[in-house]
Amino acid sequence: MTAYDEILYDVADRVATITLNRPDKLNAWTATMENSVRGAINDAAADDEVRVIVITGAGRGFCAGADMGGLQKIDANGDGRKRIVEKGEEAEVSFDDDLGPSVLEHFEGRFGYMFECPKPIIAAINGPCAGIGLVLTLFCDMRIASDSAKFTTAFAQRGLVAEHGIAWLLPRLIGSANALDILMSARKFTGEEAARLGLVNRSVPGNALMGEVADYAKGLTETASPRSMTVMKRQVYKSLFQDFNSSTSMADTEMQSSFASEDFKEGVAHFVEKRAPNFSGN
């Protein structure tokens, strides 16, 4: 298994867990950490033993935003900041060709590769989540938070803007008015409020967070077809740029393909035979 700097990477029970690992800095984001997260996601995507990916933070924080030492080195031209993902750069691992087209044409930029990852990515937000840390969670497919975790966009208080696609993503999750509220005010809000806004799927007591995430991930690994999850993920993100008829047409095509899959045969068989499924992902 590859060793990474500034993160921990572990695979158990078909779940890959990526832990941001600068606990003394509340897991403040660095170029090294970004490279490691990208590499770990690509490794997990390529690993047939992995069906779900979880991202969380070590210690009491998720990610407190960009490391301030790095921000201080940026000049008026943006020089001094290492861009990890350039516009148009392809993800190392993407949806299989026989499962349909890439979504990267719609999601260029720094974190777009996460939407291209063919496996579900869950953010387990255990503590402070700010700035680029919040952006990271929005590129995860699902978010579960500690009810006491503190969130803030932070950008307006740094003289910055809504970075890396967050201006597009936020209104689609919580509406324009709520998006502008948390962007402009940069106010702090809890995981409980984040759940009410729809920013996270749900919030739970902090001491129950990782158990909740583990149970949910286990349910996906044990009962959901990996092929179905891959196709559904692509459908949802492609449909954001389609009209209803185009989305329905894509669904009809995908349905016909699914009828020929091994997972469809197993899906019917385990239901009829009243047993647990044994999906192959094919």
Image (spheres, helix red, strand yellow):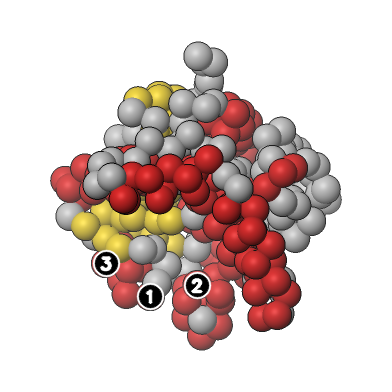
Q: Classify mark 3: helix, strand or loop.
A: helix
Q: Which residue: 57% across, 44% down?
A: 261
Q: Which residue: 30% across, 63% down?
A: 202
Q: Nearer the viewer, residue 237 or 176?
A: 237
Kindly identify which residue carries mark 3.
Answer: 192
Q: Classify mark 2: helix, strand or loop.
A: helix
Q: Nearer the viewer, residue 186 or 258?
A: 258
Tell me which amino acid carries mark 2. Answer: Leu
Kindly identify which residue carries mark 1.
Answer: 197
Q: Nearer the viewer, residue 276 or 46?
A: 276
Kindly identify which residue carries mark 2.
Answer: 173
**For the residues marked 3 and 1, what is the alpha-carbon distance in whole angstroms?**
9 Å
**For the residues marked 1 and 2, what is the alpha-carbon distance in whole angstroms?**
8 Å
Q: Residues within 10 Å of mark 1 (few under 14, many from 20)?
A: some
Q: Are marks 1 and 2 in contact (CB under 8 Å)?
A: yes
Q: Residues within 10 Å of mark 2 (few under 14, many from 20)?
A: some
Tell me which amino acid carries mark 3. Answer: Glu
The first of marks 1 and 2 along the sequence is: 2
Q: Does residue 270 lie above or below 231 as drawn?
A: above
